[in-house]
Image (cartoon, rainbow, N blue to C red):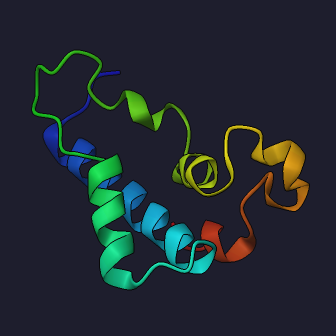
Amino acid sequence: MEWTEDDYVAYLAGERRRYAWVMRTYGGLTASRAGAEAMAWYPYEPPGTPFRGLVFHDEAWHWAMRVLHGDDYTRTHPDLAGPPPAYEALG
């Protein structure tokens, strides 16, 4: 996918925000720790980086749930298979 720099940075910020929200809400992390985890999971990749933005192929909900509950979270925690309305409202 071709990104403009503005589009990429905006999308990156949104995914970081949603990832941090999940880590606070479901993982019990402090806002500071959740923000640091989001930055680590979604590092900025400069233009020209091979596969830039590949992490976006799944949404932040999925990546955070994998960290919190493992790869099989949809089976072991079926109630967490999809995000709740509060997550969706984050935009």
Residue 77 at x, y = what percent?
85, 56
Residue at figure coordinates x 28%, y 52% from the top left: 40
| Relative vertical location of residue 81 with respect to residue 31 in this rendering, above or below | above
Q: Quadrant of residue 36?
A: bottom left
Quarter of the figure that contains the N terminus: top left
Residue in the foreground of this view, choosing between 48 and 81: 81
Q: Classify residue 44 as left or right of residue 25.
A: left
Residue at figure coordinates x 55%, y 55% from the top left: 64
Residue 42 at x, y = what percent?
31, 47
| Relative vertical location of residue 77 with respect to residue 73 in this rendering, above or below | below
Residue 44 at x, y = what percent?
18, 44
Residue at figure coordinates x 63%, y 66% from the top left: 88
Residue in the foreground of this view, choosing between 35 and 87: 35
**Outermost top residue:** 50
Q: Classify residue 79 as left or right of residue 91.
A: right
Q: Classify residue 42 as left or right of residue 76.
A: left
Residue 27 at x, y = what percent?
58, 72
